[in-house]
Amino acid sequence: MNSMDWLLPDISTPTWMEIIIAIALCVIGWLFQQFVIKKIINRTVTFLRDRQRNFQATVLAQFNKAIRYAFMFAVIVLSLSILLEIFLFTHVATKNFVLSIMVFFAFKGVYDVLNFYTKQPLLLNNDDEPNVLLPFFLRIGKVLIMILAMFTIASFWNFNLNGFLTGIGLTGVAIAFGIRDTLAHVFGGMSVALDNPFQIGDWIATEDQKIEGTIEDINLRSTLIQTGDKGLVYVPNSYLVNRPIYNLSKREKRKCEQFLFVAAENEEDKLRSALSAIQKEIYLHAQTEKEMIHVFIDEFYPTSYRVLVRFYVATNDTAEMLNVRQDILFAIRQIFQEQNIILANPDEDEWLRNKKTN
C-alpha cells in the first residue's frame, strides 16, 4: 500500500473484513448485471420489437454490452472505494480516469450501433431499394465517433488540443502527397456514392468487359464484386469512376440477335414466306416484345444470304431469355423444313468457314 502513496496519500491498509466485502460486492455486481440487467434489456428489446419499434430495439440491443460493462466498472470502483476508504468517483487523482472509462463505454455503445447498421444497412433503410450512400456514411460515422471519443477523453486530462490539431494541419499536407493514390480511391468512393450508378446487389459490367459481376459491398477505398465464377474482386473506386459502367440489373428487356445463313439458290418467294413466318412466330410468343422484331436478309454473298433475326424478350433473367431464344430457334428450324429452305454450305464460302471456326 505504501507504493500508492504518490497517487492516493490518504489510503489506509484494508482489513480482511473490508477485502471480503469488496470481493462480495464485485461478485454480487457481476451476478446482478448477468442475470438481472441482461434479462431486463433482452425483455425490453423483445417488447419493442413486438410493437414494431425495431430501431429503438436495435439500439438498445447494441448498447447491451456497453451498459453492463459500465455497470460492472462502477461496481469495481465502488468496491475499491470501500476497500481503500476513499470515494474514487470524486477523488482528484481518480475522477478523470473514472470519467474517461464511462465516456469510453458511452461512445462504444454508439459505435456498436453504427457497426451493426454498417453490416446490415437494409434494416435502417425504409425504402424498398438499398441506398448505397448509407453504408458509406455509416463507415465515416464510425471514424468520427472514435475521433470524438478520443478528443472528449483527452479534454478530461487537459490535453493541449490546439497544439495537437496544429501539428496535424502541418503534417496533413505532407501525408496527403504520400497517400494521394489512396485519397483518389476514397474520393472515387464518394463520387460513386453521390452519383449512385449502382447499388449493392446490382449486376454491373465495365465497357472493356474486364470487370463483370454482382456488387457485394461498397466501402471507402474499394468496391467488392462477385464475378461470374463466384470469385471476389476488390476493385479500387477510382478505377470504376473513370470507366463507363453498364448496370445490367436495370434492364427491363433482353435483346436476342441471331444470324442465319441460307443458300442463294433458294427462291425469293420461298425465302420471303419463310422470313414472314419466322416474324409471325416471334410475334406470337408470349414473352417477346411486339414493338421491335427484325427478320430480314441484311447481307449477300456469292453463294448465300445472311438473315438477321433480332427481337427482345420482356425479362432481365438470363435463363428465361435463353429459354425463349431456344423456342424461337426450334420454330425457325421447323419453318425451314416446311418451306424446304436450303441452308448455306460452309465449305463453299471462305468467309463462312472462317465464321464457323471463330
Image: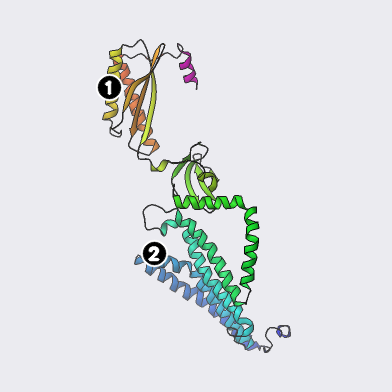
SS majority, magenta:
helix
Q: Horizontal and vertical percent for residue 23?
A: 60, 81
Please give the name of the residue rendered at 60% of the width and 73% of the height, measured from the top-left corner: 154
Does dot 2 land on a helix, a strand or a loop? helix
Q: Is residue 315 above or below residue 162?
A: above
Relative placement, left or right, of 287 versus 212 is left
Please give the name of the residue rendered at 27% of the width and 17% of the height, measured from the top-left corner: 273
Q: Horizontal and vertical percent for residue 70?
A: 54, 75
356 in the magenta segment: yes
Q: Is residue 343 above or below residue 9?
A: above
175 in the magenta segment: no
Q: Which residue carries the number 1 mark?
A: 277
Q: Quadrant of the N terminus?
A: bottom right
- C-alpha span from label 1 to label 2: 59 Å
Q: Is residue 33 above or below residue 256?
A: below
Which label was assigned to residue 104? none
Q: Is residue 114 above or below residue 333?
A: below
Relative placement, left or right, of 103 versus 323 is right
Does dot 1 land on a helix, a strand or a loop? helix
The amino acid sitting under disc 1 is Ala
Q: Horizontal and vertical percent for residue 103?
A: 55, 74
Q: In this rendering, does residue 180 appear at all?
A: yes
Quarter holding residue 271: top left
Q: Which residue carries the number 2 mark?
A: 54
Q: Which callout, 1 or 2, points at the residue further toward the start of the chain?
A: 2
Mark in front: 1 vs 2: 1
Q: Horizontal and vertical percent for residue 116?
A: 48, 61
Relative placement, left or right, of 284 versus 90 is left
Please give the name of the residue rendered at 38% of the width and 39% of the height, measured from the top-left corner: 317
Magenta extent: 346-358
| Mark 2 neighbour class, 10 Å CA radius: few under 14, some 14 to 19, many 20 or more | some
The amino acid sitting under disc 2 is Asn
